[in-house]
């Protein structure tokens, strides 16, 4: 009744002993480890999906509104079954573009300050935190 864990050795799809043939595909290849980790589906029972995408599908089946954010990389891990249509939003690591590059409202910054200014009694913590973050992003960076 003992267990030992190894890190960074690959994904095993079946138990192996020291007497087995360890030539089981790309066991020690980094790209194969990343792919298999993202899929989390060693027997290909849910093709073209990823482990977190299937988790989002389960949450949606229970009535939750779901979506995912992807920061620079492959979306495989976030991909669920097509029938659930979970949104995957791309978040860029590049510098933000200038706000109001082509102004249609001349006093946009004043409007933004008014909308995201001092909160009122009864405002939610989330709303206050969001307004503070937006104000900081617009006026300090």
Image (cartoon, grey):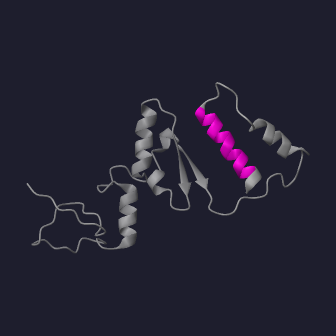
Magenta residue check for 77:
no
Most frequent secondary structure within the magenta stretch: helix
User: x%, y% of residue 58?
Assistant: 40, 38
Residue nearest the observer in this picture, 136 or 25: 136
Q: Residue furthest right?
A: 106
Magenta region, residue range = 125-138
User: x%, y% of residue 7?
Assistant: 28, 66
Task: Write the residue at 15% across / 58% down.
Answer: 3
Q: Is residue 126 above or below residue 100?
A: above
110 left or right, relative to 50: right
Placement of the N terminus among the 4 image quadrants: bottom left
Task: Write the residue at 64% across / 35% down.
Answer: 127
Magenta residue check for 133:
yes
Task: Write the residue at 89% across / 44% down.
Answer: 107
Residue nearest the observer in this picture, 75 or 109: 109
Snapshot quadrant of residue 113: top right
User: x%, y% of residue 110?
Assistant: 85, 42
Placement of the C terminus among the 4 image quadrants: bottom right
Residue nearest the observer in this picture, 133 or 23: 133
Task: Write the residue at 71% across / 51% down.
Answer: 137
Q: Is residue 10 above or below residue 86?
A: below
85 left or right, relative to 140: left
């Amino acid at each position: 009744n003992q267990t030992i864990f190894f890190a960074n050795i690959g994904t095993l799809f079946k138990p192996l002993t020291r007497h087995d043939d360890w030539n089981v595909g790309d066991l020690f290849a980094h790209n194969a480890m990343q792919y298999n980790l993202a899929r989390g589906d060693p027997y290909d029972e849910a093709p073209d999906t990823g482990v977190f995408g299937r988790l989002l599908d389960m949450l949606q089946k229970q009535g939750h509104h779901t979506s995912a954010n992807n920061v620079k990389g492959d979306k495989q891990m976030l991909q669920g079954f097509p029938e659930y249509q979970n949104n995957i939003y791309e978040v860029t690591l590049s510098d933000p573009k200038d706000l109001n590059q082509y102004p249609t409202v001349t006093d946009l910054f004043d409007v933004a300050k008014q909308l995201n200014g001092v909160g009122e009694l009864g405002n939610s913590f989330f709303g206050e935190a969001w307004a503070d973050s937006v104000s900081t992003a617009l006026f300090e960076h």
